[in-house]
Image: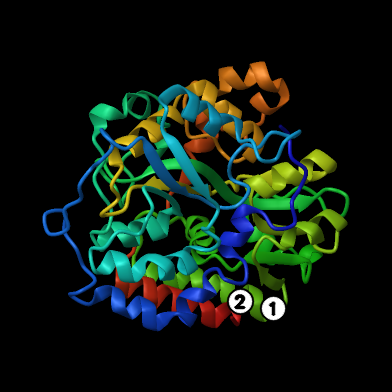
Amino acid sequence: MRTAFRPLTRRGLLTGTLGSAALVATGGALAGCGTPGAQQTEAGCASEDLSATEKKLAFSNWPQYMDVDEDNNSKRPSLDGFVSKTGIQVTYTEDVNDNNEFFGKVQNQLAACQATGRDVMVLTDWMAARMIRLGWIQRLDKSKLPNVEANLLPSLRNRPFDVDNHLAVPWQSGLAGLAYNGRVTGELRTVDELLTRPDLKGKVTALTEMRDTMGLLLMSNGHNPADFTSNQFDDALNKLKKAVASGQIRRFTGNDYAPDLAKGDIAACIGWSGDIIQLGFEDDQIKFVVPESGATLWSDNMLVPNRATHKGNAEELINYYYEPAVAAQLAAYVNYICPVQGAQAEMEKIDPELAENPLIFPDEAMLSKARVFMALDEQQEREYETKFQQVIGA
């Protein structure tokens, strides 16, 4: 089902008013992450799997991140198909409204090696990396994930926070890049154009999500956001600081940039691919651009937390969503990058136009210019976020 632009999308919930600024605002909670009592190990926090005798599963996800029957909003076709196929009953809850907020919900239980009541939860790369670093995530059995092994996009394998692909499986992915309204400005190709072109002065927004904005700036300086130094970060931040001081950037946003871009109130921005797909359904002059220097690639990941008691059932669910036909069914609704090879051919049966959309099914040329942001340790996370917040005035 093709969806019209939703003013508050899943990605907006991720990085809007509760987004990256919340890391600074909740500094006390983050500070607790490094305490000995918070850290766990696989051996020290063993989990019992009851999947053989209990055919059930608790699944926590973001709002509007599952396909819904357009005639009956209580039906979720792909998830209903999993229940019919496996007999595993799924309690599906849309209770991940923000990464930091969700961290606060489960922090005390996971730090104490207690059950959260969830068997699968979907979290963004950087939060997945934090929980993996803390030892709060169960390792998956690859032998039970043949579809993942066969069909996961090569660009999403061996990521810095999960180099052996045992802990986090992408649910959906997306790109951060440039976007512009062709009705009010000409073509845009580079980050430097966005930050310096005179005709764009005061008509530009950038994202409050540090990893996406700074990832693009790092690449514009010729550096790799997956492997950079503190000095390289500071050089990119100085470029951003100059654009703020000159008045080039009007403000920093969550995905609330999207209505302003659609109206032409801003001419260009740093934005997310999923938002621009949705805007483009209404206006083909709204364009998404992978900058010449490259785009950032992020994923929201399926994770099985410690003390989840249905890991085997969770692995069945994860493997099911890597069947190309199922992945296409989901992607037709959510409109983010589908992480499953083979889904594009299946999408042709559902919606040939969506099958040709490079923001859902990027080609190798586009993916070759996409980079995942480096996994940060606790000290780096605090240092970089604090510096970034000072520049954007959060």
User: From what the image shows, is residue 204 above or below residue 334?
Assistant: below
Q: Is residue 301 above or below residue 126?
A: above
Question: In the image, is 274 to the left or to the right of 144?
Answer: right
Left/right of residue 280 with respect to residue 17 in the rendered view: right
Which residue is found at the position 54% from the left and 65% from the top?
A: 209
Q: Position of residue 131 (x, y in %)?
A: 32, 60
The N terminus, quarter of image? top right
Q: Secondary structure at mark 1?
A: loop
Disc 2, disc 1: CB below 8 Å? Answer: yes
- Indicate the quadrant containing the C terminus: top left, top right, bottom left or bottom right: bottom right
Q: For label 1, count other residues whose C-alpha is less than 10 Å away and answer few (under 14), some (14-19) or many (20+).
A: few
Q: Which residue is mark 1?
A: 246
34 vs 137, nearest the viewer:
137
Amino acid carrying mark 1 in the image: Ser
Q: In this picture, is 178 found above or below 335?
A: below
Tell me residue 379's x, y (percent).
30, 75
